[in-house]
Amino acid sequence: MSHPSYLIAAISNSGQAPETSYRQLQNAAACPSAPYGEMFKLEVPSLMVGTLDSLMNLSDDLGKTDQLIESIVRKVEKSSHDLAGKKGSELTVGGVPSTRYIQQFAWDYAKFPNRRPLKELVSLISGGVAAIDEELKQLSNSYGEKQVALQDAKRKKGGNLMTVDLNDVLDEKTVRGLKIYDTEYLKTLFVAVGKSQREAFEKDVYGMGTELVGYGGPDWSNNPGGLGQSANFGAQVDRHGKKGSPVVPGSLEKVTEDNDSILYTVTVLRSMYEAGYYEGEEFVAGTKIDLLDAFAKVLREKRYMVRENFTYDPAQQGKAAMALEQLQVEVDNTRSGLTRWCKTHYGEAFVAWMHIKVIRVFVESVLRYGLPVDFTAVLYKVTGGKEPQLVGALDKTFGENKGKEEDIEDDEEYHDFVLIKFDP
């Protein structure tokens, strides 16, 4: 739903009664002969003026504060609409539509005491809105994280063997029929392969990672005459003189398949030992080289999915579905809570925004018309598309060159009266 546009105008009373200024403002742009908008009185409280320097500095800061608070109001509004979707209800300010609040505005003296120094008053208002912004960030991040977790859980539950929780796919009978090793030397991996890759995988699996394992060393099987004779050992043997794959021959087993993929088990060497050696009188201990990560990387490069860190646990069956339900409940509850929060805090931020607008009117009027404070401010609800005519009519009535309408195209328009735009 689009909101109407408003203009706040203030003119000096110049010694005349405020009612006279009010009639002049009405006759200029909100009457049958100049039907450019609907006009409402705007209550501007008696605020503490302070010094001229402080007012000038505050005037510069108020424009930035106005923009900052507007951006936060827009954030809360957007969050509420995104959460509610098409069935969202209109946001309100103190239980009434924002347009009615603007048109019937009354200063909240209890919340924003008018006898506090202006700088303190602005800090009080902007500080409250900054706290709303920070809380919105935290709540939105929490909601976003829960949504990501929920989508990930849904993807795993509804996915193929490359993503689904294998505890929900396998049963005890299937697992008991498999040869699964998890020892100091051997590890059985679960590997998911797309059906289009089946032939290539089964053909090449025993030749994968042929650069990973060093099988070099004394070979008495091919040289039985050297059996028992002195031979090089340890660091004097080139372990990598002969290389090969870590896959145990004959270990490939098909476990199950679905419409898109096939699940296999394959057993591989877990690690390789590099013997220690002496450097002079000092012995350098041998090292154990992990082969699992390197082999998994080889598989991933060929687009085969290693289901890492999977250990079958029958007690986990069905827990993924329960976790999904719990996540859905958490997301729904967080969504409802954030929706309620937005409805409440939109009103608070909007009230702060309106009060900043009124303070801007006060400061700009004092700087323009001087002391004692004597001006009249009104609020125009602009008739659709007639803002240029309304502004032109005010310029014609209250500008120095009365009776002449000028088209001013600069972004920073100057008028001989206070004029502040308000697009809620």
Image (cartoon, helix red, strand yellow):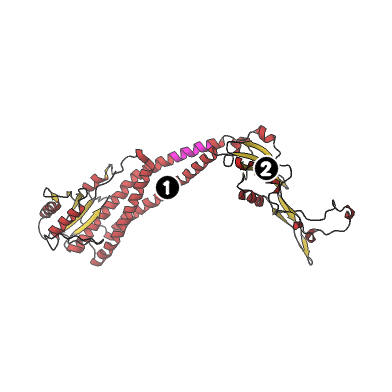
127 or 265, nearer to the observer: 265
Counting every numbered tag in the picture gives 2
| SS of the residue under disc 2 | helix
| SS of the residue under disc 1 | helix
- Residue 409 at x, y = what percent? 23, 60
Would you place residue 402 above or below residue 245 in this image?
below
2 vs 1, front mark: 2
Would you place residue 318 above or below residue 394 in this image?
above
- Residue 411 at x, y = what percent? 26, 61
Residue 124: which quarter of the image? bottom left
Quadrant including the N terminus: top left
Residue 9: which quarter of the image? bottom left
Locate residue 87 relative to residue 260 in the image: left or right.
Answer: left
Q: Is residue 269 visible?
A: no
Which residue corresponds to mark 1?
140
Residue 327 is one of the magenta-drawn residues: yes
- Residue 324 at x, y = what percent? 51, 38
Q: Is residue 134 visible?
A: yes
Seen from this angle, which residue lies furthest top? 173
Which mark is drawn over residue 183?
A: none
Which mark is drawn over residue 202?
A: 2
Which stretch is magenta? Answer: 322-332
